[in-house]
Image (tube, rainbow, N blue to C red):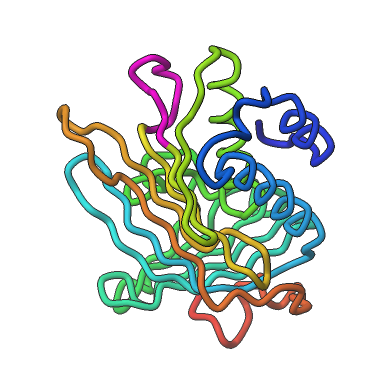
Amino acid sequence: MRGMSLIGILLLLSTIPPLWAQGSCDCKALLLQKIEQSLAEANNIEDYTCIFTKRELIGTKEVYGRIFLKFKRRPRWIYMKWLDDGHKGQELIWSPHWNKGRIYVHGGGWKKLIKLHLEPDGSLALREARHPIYCTGFENLLNKVVEQLQILRDVGVEPEVVCNDNCFLVSLNKDACPRLYGYRVEICFSQNPNLPCKVKVWDKVGGTLQVVEEYQYSQIRINVGLTPDDFDPQNPLYDF
């Protein structure tokens, strides 16, 4: 679904059968409305900064990171700096239009002397990440949720959705449709801006249902006017 336009996504949402918008508190209809509104807001953002917190299960290892993120949409640029122990001080810069599309990264602490150019889909880049860096961004996150709804619609399966304030818990019948990403997804939206602030995914690991990834976005500041200096390794505030 990467690259789908907002119009295409809205057309998809408009074709979801009416029974998806029924049920207690109209949670399904409210979820679709929230996705539509959030996508509209995400498409009007030029850039943003936030604190991005992730907890991922990779194999049997749980990986945690608290990261300061700078994101620019057009042209696409990403800067990340790890804030907590373990990888504290690690930085990376990436753009599909720069450095042959490779990630430029250095380690934290004494490892800052180690500088690497990594392919986004390579084993080193994904050693402690479940998704390639080009999947970063609110649009990609929301598109992934829409993709799951589309898969269910295609096979005629109705999701179960419960909601509480601006949080939605979607139960997915992955046993009936193995193409689904997980068995359960929780997504929460902030009110200002109207963007996702928390996503949690459950899947079966060794036959047991457990959280395999959790992402939180806090201190979101939109349209702050990021400049080329924010994505320049020569920036004196960086340690490249």
Residue 135 is situated, as x and y percent measured from the top left of the image, at 57, 46
Residue 156 is situated, as x and y percent measured from the top left of the image, at 55, 13
Total numbered badges shown on the rendered structure: 0
Residue at 55% in and 69% down? 69
Residue at 53% in and 50% down? 133
| Residue span colored magenta | 171-182
Farthest residue toward the front?
A: 24
Farthest residue toward the bottom?
A: 236
Which of the pair 123/209 is nearer the observer?
A: 209
Q: Is residue 235 left or right of residue 164?
A: right
Image height check: is 235 above or below 41?
Answer: below
Image height check: is 79 above or below 221?
Answer: above
Image height check: is 83 above or below 148?
Answer: below
Q: Hey, which quadrant is residue 183 in on the image?
A: top left
Which of the pair 51/82 is nearer the observer?
A: 51
Residue at 55% in and 44% down? 27
Magenta segment includes 181: yes
Examine the residues drawn in magenta and state their main secondary structure. loop
Q: Hey, which quadrant is residue 207 in on the image?
A: top left
Q: Is residue 99 left or right of residue 214?
A: right
Rendered-image quadrant of the N terminus: top right
Which of the pair 56/42 is nearer the observer?
A: 42
Q: Is residue 183 left or right of residue 220?
A: left
